[in-house]
Image (cartoon, grey):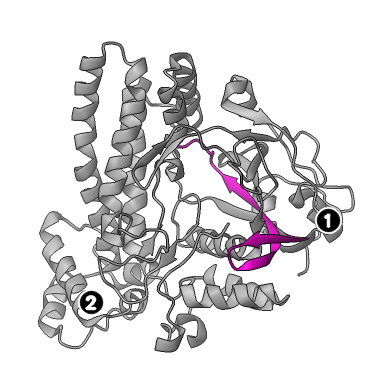
Amino acid sequence: MPFPTYLSSMGLQIPFDNTYVTLPERFYTRQGATPVRDPQLFAFNAPLAQALGMDGTGDRVELARVFAGNTAPPGAEPLAQLYAGHQFGGFSPQLGDGRALLLGEVETAQGRFDIQLKGSGPTPYSRMGDGRAWVGPVIREYLMSEAMAAMGVPTTRALAAVTTGEPVLREDGPMPGAILTRVAASHIRVGTFQAFAARDDRDALQRLTDYTIARHFPNADGPMGLLQAMMEVQADLVARWMAIGFIHGVMNTDNAALSGETIDYGPCAFMDRYHPDTVLSSIDRQGRYAYSNQPPIAHWNIAQFASALVPIMGDEDEAVAELTEAIKAFPPLYEAAWLRHFGAKFGLADATPDDRPLIEAFLTHMAHEGLDFTNTFAALPTVPEGMEDWARRWQARLPDMDLVARTNPQVIPRLHRIEAVIAAAVAGDFAPFDEMLSVVTAPYAKADTRHTAPPAEQERVTRTFCGT
C-alpha cells in the first residue's frame, strides 16, 4: 500500500511522554519484546499515526521491525502491566499482560494514548502461554476496532499489523504468527484495581485512583467521583454496542477499561439475525455474555470495581453502604443512554421513556421474523412487511430522516466475511483484508452487496473464537 509523503527515511519518531512508569514497579514488569525472524508489515494506519504525532519513518522494512518489537523506537519504555480479574464470574488474583507490552504513551491534542504491542512474546504473566498471536485474531481486532471507531464507538485503535515469519501452534495446528500495534486511551482496567485490592495494597490502590482520575476524569472528586464518572462512560459504551448489534463475548472485569473504550476484541461479533439471546462466543457456553446480558454484566462489573475501592474509603461498613447506594445509579444511566442511541436510530433526537414501547415493538418484530439487524435499520424509512400500523405511529413522531441515515450503518464487519478474510491471509493473500478494511471504515456509505448481504445458510458462522 502507498505511504504518504510525510514518511521519510529518517527512522520512526514517536513522541513518547510516559507516565505509567512513574507508578511503583509492582504495577508492571519492565522488559523488551522477543524479536521475530522475518517481520512483514501488512497494515499501517497512516492517518492515526499522523494524529498521534509520529513523524519520519523508514521504508516498510523499518516499520515492520519497529511494529514487531525487533527495534525499540527512541523513548520507548516497554513494560507488561499487572492486573487481575473475574473471568466468567470466577476471580483470578493475577493475570496481567501475557502477550502484550506497553511501549509508552503519546500526548496529543485529543488526549494521552498508550501504544502497545500484542503478540510480542512471553512475559512473567503469560501463565504457560507462548506470548504470541496468530494472524486471525490480529486481523479480527484490526477490522473490528477500526469499524467501531468509524461508527463513533469509543474503542482502542489499530495502528499497525505485521506477520512474524514464525509459526504459532494452536489447537488447529501451526498458524502464521502476527503482532498488532494497539492504541488506547489507557490500559487501566477494573482488574487493575482488583489486583491491588486482592493484596490489600492500599497505597497502590490510592496511587492508582489518583493516577486514573488525573488521566481520565480530572473533575472527579476522589473514589466516589471516579466511580460515578466510570459508570457514566460504561453506560454510554454498552448502549452504543446494543444499538449496533455488537456482542463483545468476554465482558470479564479484566476486559473492562476505566476509560470507557471497547477493549480486547476476542470472540466478538456483530449479529446478523436479531435475537436478544444471541451468543456468538465459542467459550461462552452458559450465555453469560449474550447480547441482552451485556447491560446487567456491565452493572456487575461496576459492582466489582466498587468493591475494589472499599480499602481506601475509611470505615468498611460505611464504605460498603455508600458504594452499594452509588451503583444503583447505573440502571437509570444506562436507560437514558439506551433511549438516546436507539432513539437516534429511529430519527428521534428527543426520545423519551414514552418512546420505549415504540422501539421495543420494532425489535420484537425483528426477533420474531429473524430479520437482519443492520440491514433492517439501514433500510429505514422502509419498514418490514406487516408493520404498517407501527409505521404510522412512528411517522406521527416526525422522525428526522437525516439522523436515521447518519446513525444506521450500511455495512459492518460481518463474521462470515472476517473468517473469509482470515482464510485468505493464512494462504498469503491480504488483498481481501485491504478491501474489507476500506469498506468497513466507511460504514455509512453504500457498499457492494458482497459486504452488506447477510450470510447464505451455508456461509453462516454461529461461533467465533478468541484464538490468540
Image quadrant holding the C terminus, namely bottom right
Hey, what amino acid is under mark 2? Met
Residue designated by label 2: 366
- Magenta segment's dominant SS is strand
User: Is 118 placed left or right of 354 in the picture?
Assistant: right
Res 18 seen here: no
State the SS at label 2: helix
Crowd rating for badge 1 (residues with CA inside 10 Å; few <14, some 14–19, many 20+):
few
Instruction: Determine which of the numbered discs, if any, sits on residue 192 in the image.
Output: none
* Image coordinates for residue 291, horizontal then vertical, percent: 31, 61
Query: Which image quarter is the N terminus in?
Result: bottom right
x 32%, y 21%: residue: 310
Report how far apart the C-alphas of labels 2 and 1 lie in the structure: 50 Å
Nearer-the-camera pick, 375 or 461: 461
Name which residue lies at 50% across and 81% down: 451
> Residue at point 53% right, 58% down?
145
Where does the magenta region start and end? 163-189
Horizontal and vertical percent for residue 343?
Answer: 24, 62
Of the numbered discs 2 and 1, the one sitting upstream in the chain is 1
Label at residue 37: 1
**What amino acid type should be assigned to the residue bearing mark 1?**
Arg
The verdict on residue 168 being magenta is yes
